[in-house]
Image: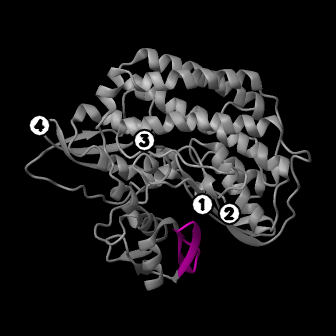
């Protein structure tokens, strides 16, 4: 236990799950992953009072497997709505409940605000309305059927399929052919680019900046068309397979270069517009110390000064340096999205211009084993663990980056006005389904 505590003090949790015999802590310490197994049948010691980043992990274990995190400071269900939930009460403050049904086409989530006038003093988020039991559907499935489910874990199908496929390949001691590995990364970067542009277009819409929203949305749609030509699907589904990729389309590289050039001219100007600066700067701050304590990942963390991106460890990204901002506010997150979108298009073009020769896939043999893999998706770290027996899933555990980042919204809105909530929410662009699994 002390070794685990020391690892968490120096690093951050990547995943926490139960493998049928032990509670498995996966911790990133430095740039390496450590695995700590604590045997558990009915209970395990809670560490969330000391390490807030473990709070939601421990609650998920309790409601899913009945394992009690002994000493947990406030044990509430996370995804299940058949269990009683007790909200924090502030008798001197007015409560404003929002959701789970919202105006417009949006996923369901419940937000309980405690306000003084219009000033938000506390926000408590309750999700789980998109809970599909996805992890329990995976055991017994072969690689093709499993990836069909995994691609629907959240709204970044390429990243989830890639992490899952690499975990499967690792369990069998395989590696996809070089050409397939490069094409996978090209799809991942295109997914990142159009995802980030969607975040930016949404932010501009929320502040009433119609020109910015329209122009960025137009270029995003054009890039998404190239994703379709390359992968066969507008969102990149049915492209990654265990052992490689299914196909190799022909995107228009000259068009992608033109879109990248136009974005490089457009985005800096949009983010310097007085309307943008007035509404986004100094709003919704998440401090560096908070990002570290809660284990935030992806642009959410990098906009608060955390210099970590899994592409730093990928040999296909030589000399990679993450985009980092120090402000921790909505503007900082928008700047990270903009710069990462341009970087993603550059990387995608590099991958697509000269992929190495060779096959697109190898057929994985049926076998036994277990392994884990991580991929830097647009929203942050995607994690998958698989245990195989005779070429089929025996156990699978996944973590979407939104699961780690939702609490950033609770921190960001404290002290802000109620009208700033939609803007803060959009700046993180969190996935409800990815959290709920």
Mark toward the start of the polypeptide (2 vs 4): 4
Spatial separation of the CA atoms under disc 4 and disc 3: 25 Å
Please state the total of marks drawn on the protein image.
4
Q: Is residue 365 visible?
A: yes
Seen at 37% across and 62% down, the residue is 293
Which secondary structure, mark 3? Answer: helix
Q: Mark 4 points at which residue?
A: 117
Spatial separation of the CA atoms under disc 2 and disc 4: 50 Å
What numbered label is drawn on residue 428?
3
Which secondary structure, mark 1? Answer: helix
Q: What stretch is highlighted in magenta?
A: 17-37
- Percent of width and height locating residue 303: 42, 45
Q: Can you tell which of label 3 and label 2 is closer to the viewer?
A: 3
Quick one: which residue is furthest to the left in this view? 92
Spatial separation of the CA atoms under disc 1 and disc 3: 28 Å
- Percent of width and height locating residue 92: 7, 49
Task: Evaluate if marks 1 and 2 touch, with contact meaning CB atoms under 8 Å apart.
Answer: yes
Seen at 31% across and 49% down, the residue is 410
Quarter of the image for residue 294 reads bottom left
What numbered label is drawn on residue 136?
1
């Amino acid at each position: 236990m002390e070794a685990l505590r020391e690892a968490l003090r120096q690093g951050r949790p990547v995943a926490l799950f139960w493998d049928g015999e032990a509670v498995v802590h996966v911790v990133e310490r430095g740039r390496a992953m450590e695995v700590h197994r604590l045997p558990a049948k009915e209970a395990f010691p809670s560490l969330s009072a000391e390490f807030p980043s473990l709070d939601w992990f421990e609650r998920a274990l309790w409601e899913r497997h009945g394992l009690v995190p002994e000493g947990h400071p406030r044990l509430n269900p996370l995804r299940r709505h058949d269990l009683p939930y007790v909200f924090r009460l502030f008798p001197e403050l007015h409560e404003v409940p929002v959701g789970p049904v919202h105006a417009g086409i949006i996923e369901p989530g419940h937000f309980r605000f405690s306000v003084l006038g219009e000033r938000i003093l506390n926000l408590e988020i309750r999700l789980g309305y998109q809970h599909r039991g996805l992890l329990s559907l995976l055991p017994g499935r072969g690689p093709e059927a499993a990836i069909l489910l995994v691609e629907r874990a959240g709204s970044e199908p390429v990243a989830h399929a890639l992490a899952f496929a690499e975990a499967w390949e690792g369990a069998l001691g395989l590696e996809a052919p070089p050409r397939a590995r490069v094409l996978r990364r090209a799809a991942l970067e295109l997914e990142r680019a159009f995802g980030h542009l969607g975040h930016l277009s949404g932010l501009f819409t929320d502040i009433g900046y119609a020109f910015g929203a329209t122009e960025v949305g137009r270029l995003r749609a054009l890039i998404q068309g190239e994703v379709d030509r390359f992968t066969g699907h507008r969102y990149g589904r049915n492209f990654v397979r265990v052992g490689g990729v299914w196909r190799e389309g022909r995107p228009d590289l000259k068009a992608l270069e033109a879109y990248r050039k136009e974005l490089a001219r457009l985005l800096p100007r949009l983010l310097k517009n007085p309307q943008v600066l007035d509404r986004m700067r100094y709003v919704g701050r998440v401090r560096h110390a908070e990002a570290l304590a809660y284990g935030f990942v992806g642009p959410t963390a990098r906009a608060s000064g955390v210099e970590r991106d899994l592409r730093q460890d990928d040999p296909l990204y030589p000399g990679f340096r993450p985009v980092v901002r120090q402000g921790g506010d909505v503007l900082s997150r928008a700047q990270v999205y903009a710069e990462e979108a341009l970087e993603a298009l550059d990387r995608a073009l590099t991958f697509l211009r000269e992929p190495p020769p060779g096959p697109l896939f190898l057929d994985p043999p049926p076998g036994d084993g277990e392994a884990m893999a991580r991929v830097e998706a647009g929203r942050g770290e995607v994690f998958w663990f698989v245990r195989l027996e005779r070429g089929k899933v025996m156990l699978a555990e996944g973590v979407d980056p939104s699961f780690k980042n939702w609490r950033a919204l609770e921190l960001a809105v404290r002290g802000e006005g109620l009208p700033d909530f939609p803007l803060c929410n959009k700046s993180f662009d969190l996935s409800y389904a990815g959290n709920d699994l």
